[in-house]
Image (cartoon, helix red, strand yellow):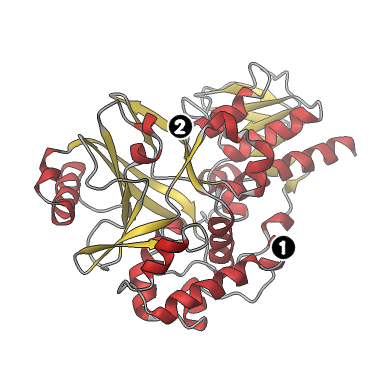
Amino acid sequence: MGSNADVLIIGGGLAGLCCALRLHQSGISSQILEASDGVGGRVRTDKVEGFLLDRGFQVLLTAYPEARRVLDYDALNLRPFYPGALIRYKKRFYRFADPWHHPIDGLLGIFTPVGSFTDKLRVRKLRSHVLTGSLSDLYNRPETTTLQALRNLGFSENMIDSFFKPFIGGVFFDPTLGVSSRMFEFGFRMFSMGDTALPSGGMGAIPEQAAARLPAGSVRTEARVESIQEDGVILKSGEKMKAHAVVVATEGPEAARLHGDQERPASRSVTCVYFAADEPPFSGPLLVLNGEGKGLINSLCFPSSVAPNYAPKGKSLVSVTIIGNPSQDDQQLESAVRAELKEWFGPSVKGWRYLRIYRIPHALPMQVPPVSDPALRPAQIRLNLFACGEYRNAASIQWAMVSGRQAGEAVIDWLQR
């Protein structure tokens, strides 16, 4: 029985790790109790036959202020995507470029059938709107759904269906665009201000870098917490651990179980299918969006075209994203996805080798209105119990990290008082 740490943190995802880092900076010891076999939560990378498979397609937006503050970008060896996308529309592919990064490609994109000329001018207005003011200002603006916000800005249904639904719907795993307009504006702001990138070692390199900054022994894996007590926790093994404070840094449904809440926070799910190919059907570090409004596939990319370490030399990695969790079993789903890919890229897809499917039921918390300023939500639940994580604030690597830091600061303040 017992713990040598001042604080027990339940969950070794980005929120829990950032909480531990903040406590460590103030000389307060903590012990992270992680139920799985490694840190990162959903931000993890598996190595399979020499390929790096992120657990669901994820990216790092380099403009995230908290990520810039906490992470060593140079050590992560970040590799950027092309600023724009390749859109599948009416059985053809069209390049849709960010004109601020690629003026010539952006100019050529004006003549594509994805959206009207006026729609493309409205993108400029949207960009100016989301870049105005502070993040706090953004989260205090009038709020509606993303779909309604886009309509209010005058975007055509063609532009919404062929670009915004696969793009923003793929970011928040919400193809109906019911996500809060504040979250949409935050995301579009971050896309506009920096790169969309992958670490050369996979997305799992992000939490691994954070964990490496903690004192040895700070993280204990395969330590599932069964219940929270007034003076600590009880593990599933029956072991009791005591501490001055406890921080719950798990995903929403698990946090609700630990708190004894009957109502579980709603989540968005996503499915990712990986294939190995000899070569990609096009060159460049591009994200491909399904702008046709039909089929299983929402988007796909070739991570090894962005960061070569994602695949063995001479091979390419294919990452297909499906919003939700289809009812087919893995074999049926793999066949259905391959059939769609053959329509897109032709018979060469037959030679692509299936690697793995990831079904992630709690990929993101629901982000429907109202969404308040994530920086203002208190972390303290009761006397010595604190909480952090995306489900409490807002979804993204940025807000998971901020939430963890804020929980650490709340614990520091409480212990000092």
Q: In terms of depth relative to the viewer, which is nearer, 4 or 278?
A: 278
Q: Amino acid at mark 1?
A: Ser
Q: Is residue 171 left or right of residue 27?
A: left
Q: Is residue 332 left or right of residue 15?
A: left
SS state under label 1: loop
Q: In terms of depth relative to the viewer, which is nearer, 138 or 84?
A: 84
SS state under label 2: loop
Residue ID at (46%, 58%): 102
Q: Is residue 375 above or below residue 143?
A: above
Say if residue 305 shows up in the picture. yes
**Residue 134's disc number:** 1
Mark closer to the observer (2, 1): 2
The image quadrant that residue 72 belongs to is top right
Q: Is residue 173 left or right of residue 261?
A: left
Quadrant where the N terminus sits is: top right
Say if residue 33 shows up in the picture. no
Q: Is residue 317 above or below residue 171?
A: above
Q: Is residue 322 left or right of residue 397?
A: left
Q: Residues within 10 Å of mark 2 (few under 14, many from 20)?
A: many
Q: In 3D space, how far apart are the residues under numbered discs 2 and 1 (Cα atoms)?
A: 31 Å
Quadrant where the C terminus sits is: top right
Residue ID at (40%, 79%): 117
Q: Which numbered disc, 2 or 1, marks the residue that appears first in the sequence?
A: 1
* Circles 2 and 1: CB atoms closer than 8 Å: no
The image quadrant that residue 56 belongs to is top left
Q: Amino acid at mark 2?
A: Ser
Residue 369 % position (x, y): 56, 69
Q: Which residue is mark 2?
A: 200
